[in-house]
Image: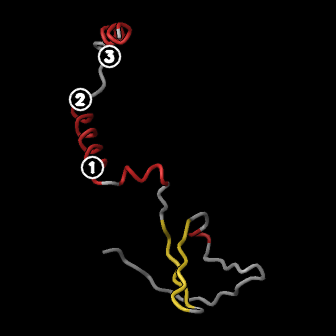
Amino acid sequence: MVPTSHSSAVKVVGAKGQISLGRQYAGRQVLVEEQEPGVWLVRTVTVIPDNERWLHQSQAAADLERALAWAAVNPPDDANTEQLLKEFQER
């Protein structure tokens, strides 16, 4: 279990509608949910771009795991480089 610390602080909403959460959150993306008028839940999030979402599907994850396992037991080898280049040129 991850230890958590709970803290409260009074913040002032600036003229442009902004509040500061502190330097530790600088550059992070957050999800702001308005649970009811005047009650907000702010959570840090990681957003996955649409063109990378397929990597998080179960089949892609399984394929990637298999490929990484294969690569772990089959290190790169230059022994057949000339033969492979010749085969590619013939295609």
Amino acid at circle 3: Asp
Task: Compute the Cα span from label 3 to label 1.
Answer: 31 Å
Between disc 1 and disc 2, the foreground one is 1
How many other residues sit within 10 Å of disc 3, few (<14), some (14-19) or many (≥20)? few
Q: Residue at x 38, y 50 (%)?
A: 54
Q: Residues within 10 Å of mark 1 (few under 14, many from 20)?
A: few
Give the amino acid type for the residue marked by disc 2 in the picture.
Asn
Q: Position of residue 66 (x, y in %)?
A: 23, 41
Q: Which residue corresponds to the image point at 28% horizontal and 12% vertical from the top-left?
A: 80
Q: Amino acid at mark 1?
A: Gln
User: Which is more toward the observer, 15 or 76?
Assistant: 15
Where in the figure is residue 3, as x and y percent of width and height?
A: 37, 77
Distance in Å between CA atoms under marks 1 and 2: 22 Å
Q: Quadrant of residue 37?
A: bottom right
Pick whichever, 3 or 51, lies toward us.
51
Q: CA distance from mark 3 to mark 2?
A: 12 Å
Q: On the picture, is 53 further left or further right than 25?
A: left
The residue nearer to you, when weighing 29 against 8, is: 29
Q: Which mark is residue 59?
A: 1
Looking at the picture, how far across and down is residue 61, in whole percent? 30, 49
Q: Are marks 1 and 2 in contact (CB under 8 Å)?
A: no
Pointers 3 and 2 in contact (C-beta within 8 Å): no
Mark 3 or mark 1: name the one nearer the start of the chain: 1
Could you tell me which secondary element the residue under label 3 belongs to?
loop
Q: Which residue is mark 3?
A: 78
Residue occupied by mark 2: 74
Is residue 37 shown above or below 16? below
Q: Which mark is residue 15?
A: none
